[in-house]
Amino acid sequence: MKVRALAVSVILAASAVTIATAQGTPPGMIRAVPDRPTRVFIMAAFDDACRSLPAPAIEITVAPKKGAVQFREGQSTSVQSSLTGKCIGTQVKGTGIYYAARADASGEDTFSISARLATGEVATRTFHMFITEGL
């Protein structure tokens, strides 16, 4: 059985980005409010039969300067994309990636993560945050 690495966007996070852009968030950025954790992504792994696999080992490769990143395992999501195009719409479990800007932060921030599966496959992702009061 071949294992695939997958980075899955959360429908809720995608909706927040669309709404935030309409309210003045620069394109390609995710809006965050100071001192409030924002789920920005879910990293998940699944097999060719669309079954969830153990959570990948995720590490921060470039830390944010204006906030902190947390990982929360066991989060459900619907597959939005995959390397093979299979499993779209399937419910899987993954690790939520959350960003929380410091209470005094504003402007832009960036961080990157790397996720490694037990098979050794690696997926990386960089997040561009726009910190502003109120959503």
Image (cartoon, rainbow, N blue to C red):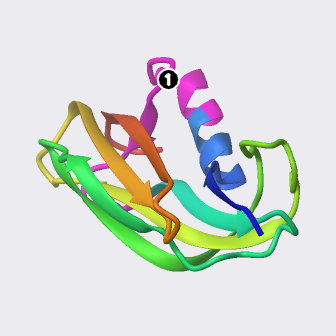
Residue 98 x, y percent position in the rendering: 40, 60
Image-quadrant location for residue 115? bottom left
Q: Which residue is drawn at the image coordinates 77% and 56% (left, top)? A: 79
Would you say 124 lies left or right of 78 here?
left
- 81 and 76: which one is in front? 81
User: Eyeballing the image, is 109 above or below 92?
Assistant: above
User: Eyeballing the image, is 84 above or below 78?
Assistant: above
Q: Which residue is drawn at the image coordinates 12% and 42% (left, top)? A: 65
Residue 69 x, y percent position in the rendering: 28, 59
**Residue type at tag 1:** Gly
> Is residue 134 one of those drawn in magenta?
no
User: Eyeballing the image, is 33 above or below 73?
Assistant: above
Residue underneath mark 1 = 28
> Is residue 36 one of those drawn in magenta?
yes
Would you say 9 lies left or right of 47 here?
left
Q: Disc 1 on helix, strand or loop?
A: loop
Would you say 22 lies left or right of 33 here?
right
Would you say 56 lies left or right of 113 here?
right
Residue 48 x, y percent position in the rendering: 83, 63
